[in-house]
Amino acid sequence: MKFRRVMAASGVLLGILVSGAVFAVANAQSNPRTPAAGDGPWDQQINSAAVSADAWFDNYKFRDGETLERVKIHYATLGTPHRNARGDIDNAVLVLHWTGADSRALLSPTFTKALFDAGRPLDANRYYLIFPDSVGHGQSSRPSDGLKAKFPNYDYGDIVDLQHKLVTETLGIEHLHAILGMSMGGMNAWQWAEAYPGMMDGVMPVVSLPIKVSGRNLLWRRMVIDGIRSDPEWKNGEYARTPLGWTLGYGVLRLMIDSASSLQTTIPDGPAAERFIAANRIQAEHADANDILYSLKSSLTYNPEPELAKIKTKLFALNFSDDEFNPDKLQVLQNIVPKLEHGRYVVQEGTPTSPGHFTMTRPELWAPHVAEFMQWLGDTADRASK
């Protein structure tokens, strides 16, 4: 039964997560409300009020010069757009997922109850919430659709470019009230604030840093990338079964993603370690190695630090003290955020049972900070609810 609980919480729903990292949802103790594998199809796991659609962009040219004949960006919306006296939508909030996830993870009961239900910080009765699947992820165009290693190389800049086209061209929104992003989505939020400084009232990056991927964060990514590419079973992306290099790399990744205190509690002995390793192996086999490889490569050009002075909007950064991906000991937020024109940050203290970077999958633990952020922006919701 313990093995089944670990597998359930590893979660088909939240899939392979990353924050600039790839990981599965932690065990049942760290995310007890995550729907279990086998509980039912996706459409039974997500908010039934959400509306899903696809946006298509023909002959799309990526930043490295490669072109894809048609790029699909899948997205979901929740809530109703409110228009001001000029006819412009003024209550739109863009919600951005982490690496390896998609809109379905954010529309799960866990996130809905903590953030989007009535009376919660992003009440869907008051806000028009937009959940895009980033390119390379979910139901948007990605390598596993068929092109495999022939898929164009994309980076975080391409992800933001396509999100912007979705918001402005497909949805016709000229100004966002807010952007909330987690992990990779948080990194994208930093990029949005630089690229489009007047387009939103504020951004809230969660578990991310506004510096290039370097040090230990770079090393683990390179190790996983090299592990996939050097595996004879990878076959330049034409593999018939999951390359062992990815399965082993995923195990290393889990050591980075979980907090030390959480692992100490949940893996007290050899049998628990065996169950943990077995669950990781099965989780890795459910992820496409090409998709993982591309998603990891896409982070390597990320570096918002040189252009932070462009950020004029309100920015509220939230990290967790036990997050090993974005270690608080580096003091990045403490050194950078006070230099912003309108910057605030919180480093939420970890606890003996909090799951480090995984805390982002427990929004009930940090929803009060989202409420604080929205109050700081000056709530358009009063207009939206009328």
Image (cartoon, helix red, strand yellow):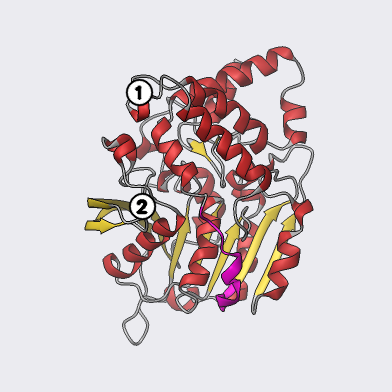
The range drawn in magenta is: 301-314
The residue closer to the viewer here, 95 or 121, is: 95
Task: Give the percent coordinates (x, y) of residue 173.
Answer: 34, 72
The residue closer to the viewer here, 40 or 174, is: 174
| Amino acid type for the residue under numbered disc 2 | Ala
Residue depicted at 46% across the width and 27% down the height: 37
Task: Give the percent coordinates (x, y) of residue 162.
Answer: 35, 60
Q: What element does badge 2 sit on?
A: loop
Where is residue 164, by image quadrant? bottom left
The residue closer to the viewer here, 96 or 9, is: 96
Residue at the spot of label 1: 239
Q: How many marks?
A: 2
Task: Give the percent coordinates (x, y) of residue 293.
Answer: 45, 37
Vertical comparison of 176 with 231: above or below: below
Dot 2, how many residues are within 10 Å of its Cα: few (below 14), some (14-19), or many (20+)?
some
Quadrant occupied by the N terminus:
top right
Dot 1, how many residues are within 10 Å of its Cα: few (below 14), some (14-19), or many (20+)?
some
Residue at the spot of label 2: 50
Q: What element does badge 1 sit on?
A: loop
Residue depicted at 52% across the width and 28% down the height: 227
Task: Give the percent coordinates (x, y) of residue 296.
Answer: 49, 42
